[in-house]
Image (cartoon, rainbow, N blue to C red):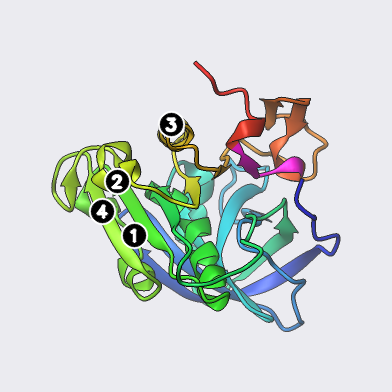
């Protein structure tokens, strides 16, 4: 299991920027007047939703970039809660509990010779952007394989291309290779490590492909989370050592710990 950051905070952040990415996504930049706890790529925030009377629980949002006094959250409109978050006006206060969970496992020795493949689908690309930046900081040059239903669902491509080679797939063929990520030729080539986040069927398919190649694979699970602290038990996942809460034991898991075999 990864080392979990013990330091977490409940903080009021100021929405400094709200950038619409198509009709269903937004990139929110939240700034803090105080120094934030150290945040690892792969960790997440539980965001209080103040603009929706229908939403009582916080929403878990992956952190796609973080600094000493800011975080960036990539939000997909999936219901009243996230819709209210996307419609939040610049200057508003957004209350967040962060950082939560455990992050990705970084290579012990970095370097451009490592073949690191980061596979993302839809809004699942968010934690991979943070990971890509950490890997580049270690001297690595990651490769990205990003999939979506259609071209407009491919997000933050300029940011990914600034970090490494980017391969694209779309279900409808509107950009990149026509088909799912596991049908892309890159998935059949050697790698030293595969990291993946996206819809569960996609992650399971990537895990199977990595297993066929004998490559270690980590995934970031997106189970429903209400509390983010392991109290409500609604995000439980079956693993080789029994049922665990994704919010505290994950969200990142090596797939050899998950009971995903069909």
User: Which residues, given as a range, are shown in magenta?
Assistant: 249-254
- Camera-nearest residue between 64 and 76: 64
Who comes first in sequence, dot 4 or dot 2? 2
Q: Compared with residue 216, is residue 207 higher up or lower down, i.e. above or below?
A: above
Q: Residue at x 62, y 53 (%)?
A: 49
Q: CA distance from mark 3 to mark 4?
A: 22 Å
CB under 8 Å between discs 1 and 2: yes
Question: On residue 212, which mark appears?
Answer: 3
Q: Secondary structure at mark 2?
A: strand
Q: CA distance from mark 4 to mark 1?
A: 11 Å
Between tags 1 and 3, which lies in front? Answer: 3
Q: Residue at x 62, y 48 (%)?
A: 60
Asked whether residue 76 appears in the rendered view, the answer is: no
Q: CA distance from mark 2 to mark 3?
A: 24 Å
Q: Residue at x 49, y 52 (%)?
A: 192
Q: Can you give x and y, in whole percent of width and height, for residue 224 in the image?
A: 61, 35
Q: Can you give x and y, in whole percent of width and height, for residue 41 in the image?
A: 61, 62
Who comes first in sequence, dot 1 or dot 2? 2
Judging by the rendered image, the residue that carries numbered circle 2 is: 148
């Amino acid at each position: 299991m990864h080392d979990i950051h013990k330091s977490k905070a409940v903080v009021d952040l100021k929405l400094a920027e709200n950038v619409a990415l198509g009709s269903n996504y937004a990139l929110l930049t939240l700034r803090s007047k105080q120094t934030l706890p150290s945040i690892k790529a792969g960790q997440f925030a539980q965001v209080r939703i103040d603009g929706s009377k229908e939403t009582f629980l916080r929403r878990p949002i992956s952190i796609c970039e973080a600094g000493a006094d800011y975080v960036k959250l990539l939000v997909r409109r999936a219901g009243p809660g996230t819709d209210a978050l996307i419609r939040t006006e610049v200057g508003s206060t957004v209350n967040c509990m962060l950082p939560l969970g455990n992050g990705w496992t970084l290579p012990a020795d970095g370097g451009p010779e490592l073949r690191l493949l980061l596979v993302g689908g839809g809004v699942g690309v968010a934690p991979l952007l943070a990971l890509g930046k950490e890997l580049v900081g270690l001297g690595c040059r990651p490769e990205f394989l990003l999939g979506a239903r259609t071209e407009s669902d491919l997000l933050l491509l300029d940011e990914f291309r600034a970090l490494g080679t980017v391969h694209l797939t779309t279900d409808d063929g509107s950009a990149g290779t026509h088909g799912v990520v596991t049908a892309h030729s890159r998935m059949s080539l050697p790698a030293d490590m595969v990291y993946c986040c996206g819809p569960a069927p996609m992650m399971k398919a990537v895990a199977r492909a990595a297993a066929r190649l004998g490559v270690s694979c980590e995934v970031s699970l997106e189970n429903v989370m209400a509390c983010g602290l392991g109290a409500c038990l609604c995000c439980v996942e079956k693993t080789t050592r029994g049922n665990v809460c994704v919010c505290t034991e994950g969200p990142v898991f090596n797939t050899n710990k998950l009971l995903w075999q069909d």
